[in-house]
Image: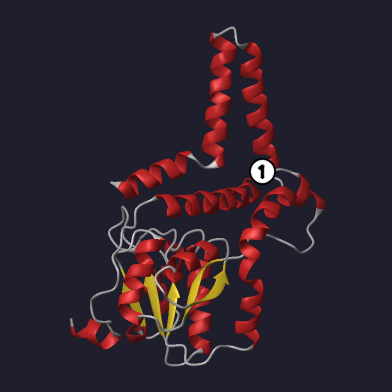
């Protein structure tokens, strides 16, 4: 119930629904009341903010501080990879499941870059295991299983993939991952904008994630003028990501913990297969 409440409230609190609701209220005031100035203010404000949030310089300025928190540490693991990495954890994201599609087409939005980065790191650390997380939501198969299928279709042996199919959010992902790897260091792969919040949730359990950002969105290189100064739904989505992570961080500190401390023995791939 709490999960559904979070998803519905989270969706309504995104910039586009909020601004559309404000604009709709303004239209109602203009058509059906005497509060003409208030109605004009609501419509004008919503229209201008939607346009501004769709501009690349503004949207990426909002997103860059979130994404850039682990840039230096990422450069370090790229130039001087850590040794003895046994696990690479790839957090779940958007997905669907259509068996008639190519496997990678079932990973939506942020998910495919996360999985491909996880595979790249897996190839750099022979003998490691890839752990994919994510529940089913309204699908017949979980996000973790879809990600594992994609990895296997790209050549990762099935015995080197572990799918954790129960977690519904990042906090639950940390709880389930802890059951397998305990407190040993591991590479944590997720979208760059989600990584600060994810690291906070994993370290809150006393775990040692090594940040490995994927799916960087904020563009710092040169762009054509028409790409920067004409509002775009693509860049509006960057503003949404910055807002989403802010709301997610606030929710993390307000909501009750939906997990429990680790009490059961640490699971290994061998014990999982035995079960």
Q: What residue is pinned by disc 1?
A: 53
* Rendered residue at 18%/81% (across/down): 275
Q: Would you call the spot at circle 1 few (<14 residues within 10 Å), some (14-19), or many (20 or more)?
A: many
Residue 117 placement, left or right of 222: left
Numbered disc 1: secondary structure: helix
**Does residue 202 appear anywhere in the picture?**
yes
Q: Position of residue 10 (x, y in %)?
A: 45, 44
Q: Position of residue 51 (x, y in %)?
A: 69, 38
Q: Position of residue 182 (x, y in %)?
A: 35, 80
* Rendered residue at 57%/65% (across/down): 192
Most extreme residue toward the right is 225
- Chosen colour scheme: secondary structure
* Rendered residue at 45%/43% (across/down): 11
Q: Position of residue 206 (x, y in %)?
A: 41, 74
Residue 160 placement, left or right of 234: left
Residue 19 placement, left or right of 273: right
Foreground: 200 or 12? Answer: 200
| Residue 211, picture quadrant | bottom right
Most extreme residue toward the top is 34
Most extreme residue toward the left is 275
Seen in the picture, residue 244 relative to 122 is either above or below; the reply is above
How many numbered marks are there? Answer: 1
**Does residue 100 appear anywhere in the picture?**
no
Seen in the picture, residue 144 relative to 17 is either above or below; the reply is below
Residue 120 placement, left or right of 166: right
Foreground: 78 or 253? Answer: 253
Foreground: 237 or 105? Answer: 237
* Rendered residue at 53%/68% (across/down): 113
């Amino acid at each position: 119930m709490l999960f559904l409440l979070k998803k519905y409230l989270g969706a309504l609190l995104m910039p586009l629904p909020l601004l559309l609701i404000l604009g709709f209220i303004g239209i109602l005031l203009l058509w059906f009341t005497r509060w003409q100035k208030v109605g004009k203010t609501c419509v004008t404000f919503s229209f201008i903010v939607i346009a501004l949030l769709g501009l690349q310089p503004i949207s990426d300025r909002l997103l860059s501080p979130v994404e850039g928190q682990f840039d230096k540490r990422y450069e370090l693991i790229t130039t001087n990879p850590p040794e003895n990495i046994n696990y690479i954890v790839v957090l779940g994201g958007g997905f669907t499941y259509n068996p008639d599609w190519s496997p990678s087409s079932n990973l939506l939005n942020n998910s495919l870059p996360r999985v491909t980065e996880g595979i790249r790191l897996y190839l750099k650390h022979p003998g490691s295991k890839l752990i994919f997380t994510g529940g089913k939501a309204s699908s017949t198969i979980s996000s973790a299983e879809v990600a594992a299928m994609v990895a296997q279709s790209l050549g990762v042996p099935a015995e080197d993939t572990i799918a954790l199919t129960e977690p519904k959010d990042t906090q639950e992902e940390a709880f389930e991952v802890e059951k397998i790897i305990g407190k040993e260091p591991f590479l944590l792969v997720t979208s760059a904008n989600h990584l600060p919040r994810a690291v906070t949730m994993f370290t809150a359990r006393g775990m040692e994630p090594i940040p490995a950002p994927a799916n960087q969105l904020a563009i710092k290189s040169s762009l054509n003028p028409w790409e920067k100064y004409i509002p775009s739904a693509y860049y509006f989505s960057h503003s949404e990501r910055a807002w989403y992570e802010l709301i997610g961080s606030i929710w993390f500190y307000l909501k009750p913990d939906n997990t429990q401390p680790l009490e059961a023995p640490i699971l290994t791939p061998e014990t999982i297969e035995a079960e």
